[in-house]
Image: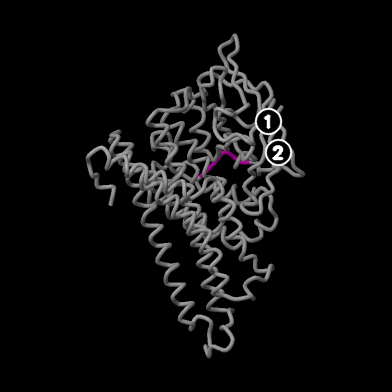
């Protein structure tokens, strides 16, 4: 008996267990660009439908991108973290919901690679290489952090763990092969458990109803006496340097979604400006794009997007380096850059997806165009955490470094 999906139709297409085999960063990025181009034309339709994007995610699964960050020895592409982050940015330029659905997949696969045991890796990673996806069951309604989670692990007499509780904001859970579940133990220790989605006692409900990112399946997952082998549990899941690295991979994936969303809005806005926008009345301009105020705004927006992309790539390279060296000063540099780009990306996404309407005028507000989907996606996604806290975290790291009597390179 499989897990119950609460919806009015099956949430995923049947897979034949095959996916393309990719090797290296170049392969991965070429495929991501091609896939983004394919998804772009149907993104508005998926947004209007607000349903689980089964066909789009089947394209992703077949493309081989789900195994982008898995080492070659496990059958994956062996791409670096920077390439995986770039995949998300590219896909977000076309459809932020599809990119958001993949964000927890890549972060949770990273956790398995860094902290999972051989037994967990040997069952989960081959599934991903074959096109399986990992969904998220991390957050809970009303719980700011793990200490407030009500979902619990209890150890059984057989040495397995029994999982009970309910999760929300479970992005990517519908149609997933595996779920990563953050759970509080009886001793308040946080663990990260992995279970196949198709299990007795697991119910996936696609009840997400956000104004943006409408097709991410970020609804409810409930667990009732679900047994999880001890080998499928990362415990404790807090405090280790590898846990910090996984966290910041996730932060950069989120930043990539925001930057990609800003780019998508910018591209569609510029296209509308060139082809359909009317000039402001009484100013004597033949075309809306002749207005120097519009030109100034466009110039600033393109510069900010390019700056965001450059900082994202820089932060990703610093994080990859910090994971290799395992030095605290290198991780500190990566944290500063990651938080800086997280704050900047959130601002870019919200501001640019709104600014394009000022360039294009009232006709751009026609609901049939659905240009507002970029702003709805950006505003919804950036509510994960305030941009000002990202800047504050970066600032705290810089102040701490200066206070220690040194002036590391990452300060400037």
Q: From the viewer's perspective, is 367 left or right of 188?
A: right
Residue 18 is a magenta residue: yes
Where in the figure is residue 51, as x and y percent of width and height?
A: 69, 50
Q: From the viewer's perspective, is 265 left or right of 78?
A: right
Q: Are marks 1 and 2 in contact (CB under 8 Å)?
A: yes
Where in the figure is residue 95, as x and y percent of width and height?
A: 56, 56
Secondary structure category for the residue under label 2: strand
* Residue interval drawn in magenta: 15-19
Q: Nearer the viewer, residue 337 or 324?
A: 337
Picture disc at residue 231: none
| Identity of the residue furthest to the left in this view | 406
Where in the figure is residue 370, as x and y percent of width and height?
A: 64, 65
Rendered-image quadrant of the N terminus: top right
Residue 352 is a magenta residue: no
Q: Residue at x 41, y 34 (%)?
A: 244
Label 1 vs 2, first from the N-terminus: 2
Q: In whole angstroms, how far apart are the C-alphas of marks 1 and 2?
A: 8 Å
Q: Does residue 362 lie above or below 110 as drawn?
A: below
Which residue is denoted by mark 2 in the rendering?
A: 205
Picture disc at residue 222: 1
Where in the figure is residue 26, as x and y percent of width and height?
A: 38, 52
Q: Does residue 83 lie above or below 348 as drawn?
A: above
| Identity of the residue furthest to the top in this view | 157
Q: Residues within 10 Å of mark 2 (few under 14, many from 20)?
A: many
Q: Is most of the magenta stretch helix, strand or loop?
A: loop
Secondary structure category for the residue under label 1: strand
Q: Does residue 405 lie above or below 374 as drawn?
A: above
Q: Does residue 383 lie above or below 357 as drawn?
A: above
């Amino acid at each position: 008996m499989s897990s119950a999906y609460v919806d009015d139709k099956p949430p995923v297409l049947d897979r034949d267990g095959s996916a393309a085999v990719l090797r290296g960063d170049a392969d991965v990025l070429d495929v991501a660009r091609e896939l983004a181009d394919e998804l772009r034309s149907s993104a508005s339709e998926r947004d209007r439908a607000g349903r689980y994007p089964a066909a789009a995610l089947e394209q992703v699964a077949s493309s081989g991108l789900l195994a982008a960050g898995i080492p070659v020895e496990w059958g994956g592409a062996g791409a670096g973290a920077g390439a995986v982050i770039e995949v998300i940015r590219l896909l977000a330029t076309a459809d932020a919901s599809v990119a958001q659905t993949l964000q927890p997949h890549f972060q949770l696969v990273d956790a398995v690679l860094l902290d999972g045991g051989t037994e967990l890796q040997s069952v989960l990673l081959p599934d991903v290489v074959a096109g399986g996806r990992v969904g998220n069951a991390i957050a809970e309604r009303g719980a700011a952090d793990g200490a407030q989670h009500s979902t619990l692990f209890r150890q059984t007499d057989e040495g397995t763990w029994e999982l009970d509780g309910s999760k929300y904001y479970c992005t990517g859970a519908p149609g997933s092969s595996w779920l990563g579940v953050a759970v509080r133990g009886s001793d308040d220790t946080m663990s990260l458990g992995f279970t196949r989605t198709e299990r007795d006692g697991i119910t996936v409900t696609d009840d997400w109803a956000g104004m943006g990112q409408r097709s991410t399946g970020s609804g409810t997952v409930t667990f009732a006496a679900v047994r999880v082998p001890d080998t499928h549990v990362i415990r404790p899941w807090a405090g280790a340097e590898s846990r910090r690295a996984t966290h910041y991979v996730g932060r950069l994936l989120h930043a990539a979604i925001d930057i990609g969303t800003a780019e998508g809005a910018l591209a569609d806005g510029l296209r509308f400006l060139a082809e359909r926008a009317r000039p402001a009345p009484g100013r004597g301009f033949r075309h809306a794009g002749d207005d120097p105020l519009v030109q100034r705004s466009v110039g600033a927006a393109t510069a900010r997007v390019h700056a965001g992309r450059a900082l994202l790539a820089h932060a990703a390279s610093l994080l990859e380096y910090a994971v290799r060296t395992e030095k605290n000063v290198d991780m500190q540099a990566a944290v500063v850059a990651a938080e800086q780009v997280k704050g900047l990306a959130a601002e870019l996404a919200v501001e640019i997806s709104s600014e394009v309407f000022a360039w294009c005028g009232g006709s751009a507000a026609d609901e049939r165009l659905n240009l507002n989907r970029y702003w709805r996606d950006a505003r919804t996604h950036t509510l994960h955490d305030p941009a000002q806290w990202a800047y504050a975290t970066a600032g705290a790291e810089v102040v701490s470094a200066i206070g220690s009597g040194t002036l590391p390179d990452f300060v400037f």
